[in-house]
Amino acid sequence: MLKDREVARWFGQVSQGSKKTARVYLRRLGYACDRYHTTPRAVAKLDRRGIRDFMVDMVNDMDSRGNAGGYIESAVKAVKSWLRFNLRPVGEIRVKIPRLNETPTIANEVVPTREELARILAAKDIRAKVAVALVAFTSVRPEVVGSTTDGLRLRDLPELEWDQASKKAAFAPGQIHPRNAFGTAR
């Protein structure tokens, strides 16, 4: 799709805000176009009724296939982003998205027990142990730890003290604000 100059231009603009969002939107727009046998340019040429019908049909189809509400919402946002970029009227077009607040992919997940967490930490290398510990004990999201370009760095934790002799890190007593470095209450 990026061979189309307008799609590439839109992708570049979305990337200015977030490269991850741009990639997701590109996939969602591409999927919608493939699924409904159209092109991004054809979608951009639809009139208001055509835009509404395209999005309603897309939502109904994705719902009938059992897609999660959040996934459907992401597809709608991608199409609307593309349409706004092409100066199409989407502001007043509302599409109801079913099961928007449901999280079926995590509905059956459970918090690991202390024993399970201990086994996880025992089975990983030091880098993985740190990542698991940060997620388990500090409420950061995996994306914060997993980014190779701008993930969490020790310098992001000014309250952390490193003892070179013992090779241990600790937060100095009284140095942590009631809201920790991750924005969660202690």
Image: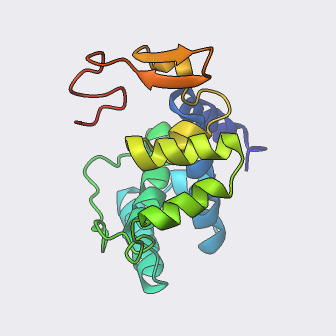
The one nearer the camera, 25 or 4, is: 25
- Looking at the image, which residue sits at the far right? 3
Task: Kindly indicate the quadrant of the structure image that contains residue 2.
Answer: top right
Closer-to-camera residue (152/186) = 186
Q: Picture coordinates of residue 34 (x, y %)? A: 66, 68
Camera-side residue: 41 or 32?
A: 32
Identify the residue at image location x=58%, y=51%: 24
Q: Is residue 88 left or right of residue 150?
A: left
Identify the residue at image location x=31%, y=68%.
97
The spot of residue 29 in percent (x, y) is 58, 56
Q: Position of residue 33 (x, y in %)?
A: 62, 64
How many numbered marks, from 0 up?
A: 0
User: Is residue 21 visible in the rendered structure shown here?
Assistant: no
Does residue 74 sit above or below 20 in this rendering?
A: below
Side of 100 where 163 appears, left or right: right
Q: Quadrant of residue 111?
A: bottom left
